[in-house]
Image (cartoon, helix red, strand yellow):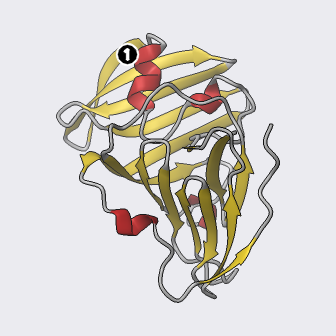
Amino acid sequence: MHRRIYFLTALLFWAWIVPAAWADNGTMTHIVFRMVDPNIPEGHFAMAPKEIWRIDLQYMRMEEVPDPDRGIHGLVIVDEPNAFMINRYNNQGQHMVDPGPTFEVHMPIFPFRQSSETSKLEFGHELEFFSQRKAKKMPNVKAKGKRYKSYMLEIDGARLILFVDEVTGKPTQLSLKSGKDDYSVHYDIYESGLEPDMTLFKVPAGVKISEAEAPSAH
């Protein structure tokens, strides 16, 4: 079974996809990102920053900022085959066990896209996705005193554009346009090749965990 876990506003969801053919070679990736949707007002919680840490296909942590209006501070921790969905506001969470036979965690950037190809575009592997599919090199862009490379892919009826810092080589923005859909991901922090901090993938002290039934393998 192949697992991908993601946030949509302050809710947590499970889904399953075909595994990607990559790994991080035991190093850690850390990303802080914001989704931008022109149909959602500025300042809405759905546009608030979210933070990700991941190591290969086994370890993942994703955390939202607190949402006082809903009383939710969402946190997901995965150490395959174990996954924990936690609300840090009330320090309660649920534990699920992946029944297998394959234990992998995936993190799609656009989980609402049903396309099999677009769903393979994951946080931490944007450059590989564009490179493997031979993305078209677009003109460089200059903004706020910095220069950015840009790459474009047309796939599954969608146009994807990736902007990369010319100096650091790290993604800074990813846009998707398809019909009326017009979304962007802005990367506030993008760090890769980090020394793993395994404490990030442990349930925080004081959190009460109950057991939940995991989806059936298929």
The vertical placement of 114 against 85, above or below, is above
Q: Quadrant of residue 181?
A: top right
Where is residue 121 shown, x and y percent of the image?
55, 31
Tell me the residue at 44%/28% (across/down).
Answer: 22
| The N terminus, quarter of image | top right
**Relative to 17, is 23 on the left or the right?**
left
**Relative to 13, is 189 on the left or the right?**
left
Q: How many marks?
A: 1
Q: Can residue 149 be seen at all in this image of the molecule?
A: yes
Where is residue 152 shown, x and y percent of the image?
47, 18
Please name the residue that numbered disc 1 is placed on: 138
> Nearest the camera: 87 or 72?
87
Where is residue 75 shown, x and y percent of the image?
56, 69
Where is residue 21 shown, x and y percent of the image?
49, 25
| The C terminus, quarter of image | top right
Q: Can residue 177 be seen at all in this image of the molecule?
A: no
Tell me the residue at 51%/60% (across/down).
Answer: 62
Tell me the residue at 68%/58% (across/down).
Answer: 97
**Relative to 112, is 193 on the left or the right?**
left
The vertical placement of 187 against 167, above or below, is below
> Nearest the camera: 210 or 165?
210
> Nearest the camera: 28 or 154?
28
The vertical placement of 62 against 112, above or below, is below
Q: Quadrant of residue 131?
A: top left
Question: Element type at marker 1?
Answer: strand
Look at label 1 and name its amino acid. Met
